[in-house]
Image: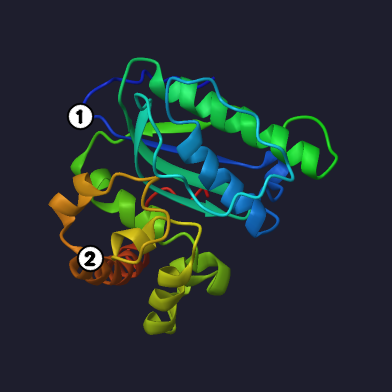
Amino acid sequence: MRNIKFITSEICLYHIYNRGVEKREIFLDDSDYLRFIHNLYEFNGNDAARKFSVCENITKINSNKQGNLSVEILCYCLMPNHYHILLRQKRDGGIVQFMHKLGTGYTMYFNERYQRSGVLFQGKFKAVMIDNEAYFKHIPYYIHSNPLEIIEPDWKIDGINDMKKCLQFLENYRWSSYADYIGKKNFPSVISKEFFTTILGNNYQYRQQIEEWLKREIILDNNGVTIDRSF
């Protein structure tokens, strides 16, 4: 059971994450990633979620969405078998409603497309309230650095062999909000980045800071100080 109360407040942020049941992959190709990102945008509001056909060609995010938002999405990252979303609630009950529509809608799409049935995600979505300064400072970098596992699976233990290559990989990874944070328009309508850019700096500064964070995380880990690496 998820033991957390979601509070509607400008200062209450929540790290939301989940993985595929039995750690199975939940994104098998670009169409799957794009559908989930589209759903992040489409299902964020009071309106009933529209059912999208599996064969419907979703190639971009419509930036003319109307209605009150349920949540404010600050950053996200999709990986082959899991996802991370950082958000804050815009109205009471908003997070639960949004995540229900997101999980149900994507599962229906995935099951129909791949001719399967049953649950897709590993239980209810997980949620952690950002309640201390250390967590607040590292969470956007932690979420955005997840794709490095694809090209350097052991970087958290052994360090990064080629920092330039890794930063370029993060910049070109479409299924994350990192590109939008460094000024490369990817899916800018999905997120609200003003909150973190006000605190962490502009596009250039954010790129510099994530590089420094990656270096520091290696040093901290070698000294025995760790963060949640469960995903």
| Residue 147 in picture, x, y percent from top left | 50, 63
Query: In the figure, is residue 86 to the left or right of 148?
Result: left
Query: In the figure, is residue 29 to the left or right of 96?
Result: right
Residue in the picture at 22% in, 38% down: 132
Residues 156 and 122: in front is: 122
Residue in the picture at 14% in, 51% down: 199
Query: In the figure, is residue 95 to the left or right of 88?
Result: right
Query: In the figure, is residue 211 to the left or right of 162?
Result: left
Q: Which residue is mark 1?
A: 10
Residues 74 and 229: in front is: 74
Q: CA distance from mark 2 to mark 1?
A: 23 Å
Reply above or below: 124 against 187: above
**Secondary structure type for disc 1:** loop
Residue in the picture at 64% in, 59% down: 30
Q: Which residue is mark 2?
A: 203
* Type of amino acid under label 1: Glu
| Residue 116 in picture, x, y percent from top left | 84, 38
Residues 79 and 63: in front is: 63
Reply above or below: 133 against 48: below
Image quadrant occupied by the N terminus: top right
| Residue 44 in picture, x, y percent from top left | 44, 31
Residue 204 seen: yes
Reply above or below: 5 against 73: above
